[in-house]
Image (cartoon, rainbow, N blue to C red):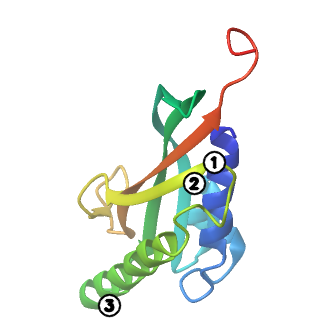
Amino acid sequence: MSYSSVEAAVLTILQGLTGTFASTSDVTRGDYEVLDSGAGATAVLIPGSFEQDGIGEGGARKSVRNWNVLIDLFRKYVDEGTTWTSFETDRDAVIAEIERYPTLNSEAGIVNVIVRSDADPGEVFDEDDQGPFFVWQRLRIRITERADLSGGEFT
């Protein structure tokens, strides 16, 4: 499996959150132009860091990869109370949905998925300090994959 496959699986899971995102196009891979769409809730997935290690398991050699998918979650700003309450509901829904798929809906080799915040939530202003226009927070999804190694020195 590749990072791209992992990110695509997370994208598919989040696009299924029809109670949070009005359209599948409100969840994108790296396309921040979705913020100009007028949607109430949006999410942009971007690559995060990764770690790789090898382990021996029953005589076989496996690669253990920890992929990180970053989710920038946005809620369009309406007013102080409504916006923050809606944002909290959106974030709770994203976390719960990811938790429901601990192997990213049975993706090969995926053994664990953990969600955590990567930053405190905040308000988004433009370069002239006008706004706020959105409330946002970055979530980090850590996905652990175990993959058989073959070829090279593993023939």
Q: Is residue 129 above or below residue 12?
A: above
- What's the mark number on residue 82? 3
Q: Nearer the viewer, residue 15 or 101?
A: 101
Determine contact: label 3, label 1, CB under 8 Å.
Answer: no
Mark sitting earlier along the chain (3/1) = 3
Counting from the top left corner in percent of width and height, residue 13 is at 63, 69
Seen at 56% across and 44% down, the residue is 145
Q: Nearer the viewer, residue 95 or 25?
A: 95
Residue tagged 2: 32
Q: Amino acid at mark 2?
A: Tyr
- From the image, state whether disc 1 or disc 2 is nearer to you: 1
Counting from the top left corner in percent of width and height, residue 125 is at 33, 60
Q: Amino acid at mark 3?
A: Thr
Q: Is residue 24 above or below residue 8?
A: below
Q: Quadrant of the C terminus?
A: top right
Q: Is residue 83 above or below residue 29?
A: below
- From the image, state whether disc 3 or disc 1 is nearer to you: 1
Query: In the orientation shown, which residue stands out farthest toward the front?
Result: 58
Secondary structure type for disc 1 = loop
Residue tagged 1: 109
Determine contact: label 1, label 2, CB under 8 Å.
Answer: no
